[in-house]
Image: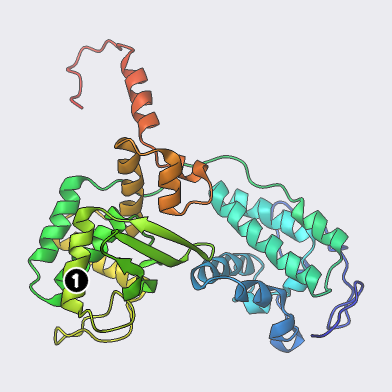
Amino acid sequence: MTEHSQTGDARGGPLTTDTAPLERAAWSPPSELAPVAMEQRPAVSDSPEEVYLAGLSPTGRRSMHSKLTSVARLLGASSVEEVPWERMRYREVAAIRARLIAAGLAPATVNSTLSALRRVAREARNLGFISSAEYDLISDVEPARGSRVLAGREVARSELVAMLDACAADDGLAGSRDVAVILLLYGGGLRRSELPELSLDDWDLESRCLRIRHAKGNKEREVFVSHGAAAALEDWIAARGRVRPGKLFLPINKGNNVGGERISDQAVYVLLNKRRVQAGLARLSPHDLRRTWVGDLLDAGADIASVQKLAGHASPTTTARYDRRGRRALRRAADLLDVPYGKDQPQT
């Protein structure tokens, strides 16, 4: 690996934070971070963003690449590769934070983007592009404050049944597969990205346990699914063929035959949307089924620590955001006040 001094980069330019003052009204990228020709960038093995992204899981890589792409466009570049991330300093990161907040992005989105920039800066330090002191300054950029109401919606039981009915009306293999997918999204709380990674031998019928080997954050976990989801999964495995090794969920071709090695996470979204449209329902996403599963478990009396482990959340704080019980308590508190109005009260 090429060695870099703490006072110069691969192109011979100084590693300095003496960029031009940032104008608040019409901000443009400092010259140190302006897009440069590809031949001026370090080799891929020496590019801090490439080293960072290479260490992530496929799902994490897509997500963080998207964050870096947003920053690249903010800097006037058309791609991540055009930005010399190794020149990034505290001033640039602070300016990017300010622009993201000014754009009205949710605090969680701003903070995940800042996290990606910090990780790129850490690799830049490890590769010798910046000093430890400069990295510490970048790490000190304050996170965005605040919170937002959770995006998406809950899925009513009647809507779940309607989608299952739509699958049942399909007498092909896709109907059986899609029932299993939908019920694992709801009955097991799987992420969309986790379903395509499941292999046949990850399923144990006796314990009704699925081993998730490629979960978020490159972690493994076990998920115990409900009896209904287990029965649907067994029906699909019988249709799929138990003797066929490989991934659990496979594509179905136009001839109604199992073909291909795996479905994609985009295919999960497409098949759910297809069944949603057939059922005549409002828009919903795979994550809506997952959040409904978390809320239903908590409503049924499951303790938050257990639900956190089943969901694969890193923190119980994340799990608590899906807890509907507090929302209902707030509504009951609001109903304690009788507000007089001459017209009939709306029925709720």
The residue at which mark 1 appears reads as 236
- Residue 192 at x, y = what percent? 37, 64
Judge whether 12 appears above or below 91 on screen. Answer: below
Judge whether 316 appears above or below 168 on screen. Answer: above
Task: Kindly identify the residue that appears in the image at 40 percent across and 42 percent down.
Answer: 322
- Residue 156 at x, y = what percent? 22, 45
- Residue 337 at x, y = what percent? 33, 12
Res 167 → quadrant: bottom left
Q: Nearer the viewer, residue 200 or 61?
A: 200
Task: Tell me the SS state at disc 1.
Answer: helix
Judge whether 330 appears above or below 236 on screen. Answer: above
Q: In this view of the protein, can residue 148 be seen by the observer?
A: yes
Amino acid at the residue labelled 1: Trp
Q: In this view of the protein, can residue 149 be seen by the observer?
A: no
- Determine whether, in the image, residue 268 is placed left or right of residue 306: left
Task: Kindly identify the residue that appears in the image at 57 percent across and 47 percent down.
Answer: 107
